[in-house]
Amino acid sequence: MNDLSIRNLHVQINGKEILKGFTLDLPKGEVHAIMGPNATGKSTLAYTLMGHPSYIVTEGEVVFKGQNLLALKPDERSRLGIFLAFQYPVAIPGVTVANFLRTAVNARRKAENPEDKGISIPDFRKLMREKMEMLKMDPAFAGRYLNEGFSGGEKKRAEVLQMAVLRPEIAILDETDSGLDIDALRIVSEGVNALRGPELGVLVITHYQRILNYIHPDVVHVMMDGRIVESGGADLALHLEEHGYEWVREKLETGSGA
């Protein structure tokens, strides 16, 4: 099974429990969205799945491709096929987008085969050209220092370019819509949609429905108090946009929720 399977996940940070029995299955080939109010644990989930050391798992399991994801280091999780697009990507002055990505590609190849000499410069240039054309990006973008002086939209497009080059099997988008105007949101979403397919599962974490106008989810989940409390189709996101989260809270309080 190549699905990402999360079962009864409990996670603490600084001694405070944030995830409280989180359970989710994300199959390859599907797009799932997680929505919820602030401070409900959405970003905690993203960082936990990628192995951030500040997030302590106290209970539960995460399995991907038959392996215990929680037993792996962040770089091992990446090589297994997990990718995280950050809400706030950091700048790396002096390192171009192209050099960063070629180093990442070579690190993966070296891990798979210690004798690998790395991707040749001509082959890498061809790869970059193909991916940037697919994403409708200016080739000059590759020569800029990673995220230094980038607008919010450019930072998120750089994340999508990394996805395109590294070809993950599960991509987690942690509030990719944060800080984007409508034009930038549309451009970034088009890039994600260009990568959709049967070999990629996508988990979109967001506060708002607007990104889901462009990246259409197969399933929408509502997260509250560190767990999934409601799931449904794309129309659930529209309902949340119109009515907010109070109806979900009321449903939980009356005992009729998930």
Image (cartoon, rainbow, N blue to C red):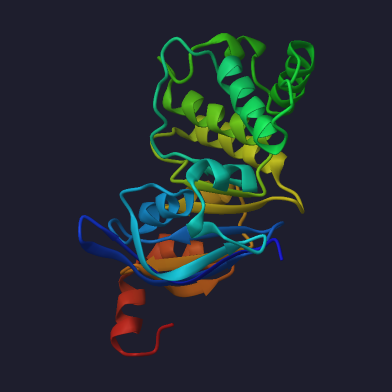
Residue 251 in picture, x, y percent from top left = 35, 83
* Quadrant for the N terminus in the image: bottom right
Residue 158 in picture, x, y percent from top left = 55, 26
Could one spot residue 81 in this view of the protein? no
Q: Is residue 215 above or below residue 188?
A: below
Q: Is residue 73 above or below residue 159?
A: below
Question: Residue 30 vs residue 49: left or right?
Answer: right
Question: Residue 5 vs residue 17: left or right?
Answer: right
Q: Residue furthest bottom?
A: 255
Residue 254 in picture, x, y percent from top left = 31, 89
Residue 47 in picture, x, y percent from top left = 41, 49
Q: Residue furthest left?
A: 15
Q: Nearer the viewer, residue 52 or 216?
A: 52
Question: Residue 15 vs residue 119: left or right?
Answer: left
* Quadrant for the C terminus in the image: bottom left
Could one spot residue 79 in this view of the protein? yes
Q: Nearer the viewer, residue 181 or 50?
A: 50
When asked about the image quadrant of residue 30, the answer is bottom right
Q: Nearer the viewer, residue 197 or 72?
A: 72
Q: Residue furthest front?
A: 115
Q: Residue at position x 38%, y 61% from top? A: 36
Q: Residue at position x 67%, y 43% from top? A: 193
Q: Is residue 92 above or below residue 237?
A: above
